[in-house]
Amino acid sequence: MIFIKQSYKKNPGELIISVVIPHYKDVERLLGLLKSLEGQSLEKENWEVIVVNNDPELPLVLPNDFSATYPLQILEEKKPGSYTARNKGIVEAKGQIIAFTDSDCLPDKGWLKNAMELFLQDFKKEIGILTGPVPLFFKDPKNLTDAEVYEKYTGFTTEAYAKEGHAITANWFSYKSVLFEFKCFNEKLKSNGDSELSGKISQKYSIVYGENILVRHPARHQTSDLVNKYQRLLGGTYTRRFQGNKAAFRKFVLDFVLRRYRFSLKKIFTVTPKESFVILKVCHAINKGAVKEYFNLIRGGDTKR
């Protein structure tokens, strides 16, 4: 991993960044993202936005009173899966650089400009993935829900993840040519696809971490959202690593459950009694969901999306 602190000033020239955003039943927060992108400091002729709706039943129609001053394209992808949606966006993108974020995220106003400046310094095309911080934000920081308390202590550790050769699609830039070289995302996966693809890319190219490449992500508000998140992660892991090996997957899930409980017990000594109880309660709910998903998967059930 290459760690970047300094940005560079240079004319973007003819480089175009295509921002690809998968969408599934979250119009309100998608509109928040699209409106926030108006504040990007990179000149609008140097980027475009592609939203790929992944709801097979309901086409995405933006409100009549919404308009964008930047190039915006809405695509439909009926095959379920955010990675399938992202792949469609990659194919349709005009840009030489692809940026990924999620429909509920809020990039910093310098997100695209700072990324462009780093790519303009990449004369040898050594960057495989450019990523950066993904800090959480809360609906009401003074009145956190149980899930938000848990997220406060388990948020995204994108710097450490980058050092391991990985990135998450909430904040990811790559050359379009690099994505095509590795055949884009694995469409069989509903989770873990970013881990799989970034791991492959990092074997040949650099994972660059920039402190000023910043995207804010909402903390999950309900415990059920966290349970669903970890069930999706387990499904992705099962598809990638454990299909046909139930014994190994059982061991993996058991270790997952024990790590959640160990984490909650350690917090007894480092946070307030009220928060430590909340964390234990949330960990227990996550573990119940993990065990339920384990049985669903080994019995041939579909992975969560």
Image: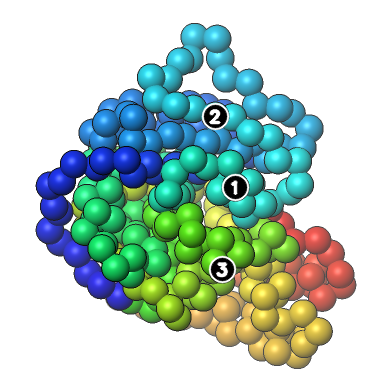
* Marker disc for residue 257: none
Horizontal and vertical percent position of residue 199: 49, 75
In which quarter of the view is residue 144 placed?
top left
Q: Considering only vertical position in the picture, is 153 above or below 55?
A: below
The residue under the point 51% across, 75% down is 200
Mark 1 vs mark 2, foreground winner is 1
Element marked by disc 2 = strand
Q: Give the amino acid type for the residue marked by disc 1 in the picture.
A: Val
Q: Amino acid at mark 3?
A: Phe
Q: Determine the secondary structure under disc 3.
A: loop
The residue pinned by badge 1 equals: 91
Give the quadrant of the N terminus.
Answer: bottom left
Q: Would residue 35 be found to the left or right of residue 141 on screen? A: right
Work out how far the residue at label 1 is from the one at label 3, CA to CA, in angstroms. 13 Å
- What residue is drawn where x is 80% and y is 61%? 302
Tell me which amino acid carries mark 2.
Answer: Gln
Residue furthest to the right in view is 299
**Real-space Cα separation, disc 1 to disc 2, in angstroms:** 13 Å
Give x and y (percent) for residue 299: 87, 72
User: Which residue position holds label 3?
Assistant: 182
